[in-house]
Amino acid sequence: MYLVTVMAEAATVLLVEDNEDNLRIYSTILTYSGYQVIEATDGEAGLAAARERQPSLILMDVSIPKIDGWEVTRILKADPATATIPVIALTAHALATDRERAQEIGFDGYISKPAEPRQVLAEVERRLGKPTPRQAV
Ligand code: MN
């Protein structure tokens, strides 16, 4: 006889951000809170990671190299394989036109930068729920 304990798989957050400071800060708080974090620093890498890893949620800086976050999200939302992954925009542009554009493209949420790490964490928790704390063995 044996016992198998199945741990809940940690929710995975894909963080697409080219600013090194923001990447470190957001990645650290999300990891510390129990999420599994995948980091990408440009649009091509973000697109590939989204397709291959099927994250639970994507935090998408819109201003990133190679393919910008608007275009990456448009591509993801047009593809049935990735369309249902929630994508939260991170943008320094708090303009009303940007909000409209974000809605048109299909972003599921919107965070204006500079964003407090706590604010980013709160948005992720609101969407995914708080991760189950890892149990000590
Ligand atoms: Mn950027």
Image: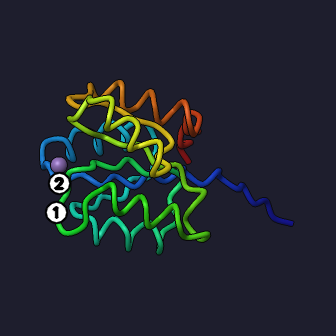
Query: Is disc 1 surrounded by few (<14), some (14 to 19) or many (20+) residues within 10 Å?
Result: some
Q: Quadrant of residue 99?
A: top left
**What amino acid is at disc 2?**
Asp
Mark 1 lies within 8 Å of ligand 1 (Cβ measured): no
Q: How many marks?
A: 2
Per the model, the C-alpha gap separating discs 2 and 1 is 7 Å
Foreground: disc 2 or disc 1: 1
- Where is residue 26? Give x, y as percent: 28, 40
83, above or below 91, in the image: below
The residue wearing badge 2 is: 18
- Where is residue 135? Give x, y as percent: 56, 42
Question: Residue 132 or 59: which is nearer the viewer?
Answer: 59
Q: Residue at x 56, y 48 (%)?
A: 137
Q: Residue at x 22, y 35 (%)?
A: 93
Q: Residue at x 45, y 31 (%)?
A: 123
Question: Residue 54 or 86: which is nearer the viewer?
Answer: 86
- Where is residue 63? Give x, y as percent: 20, 51
**Residue farthest to the left?**
20
44, above or below 120, in the image: below
Q: Which mark is residue 93?
A: none
Disc 2, disc 1: CB below 8 Å? yes
Question: Residue 113 or 15: which is nearer the viewer?
Answer: 113
**What amino acid is at disc 1?**
Pro
The residue wearing badge 1 is: 65
Mark 2 lies within 8 Å of ligand 1 (Cβ measured): yes
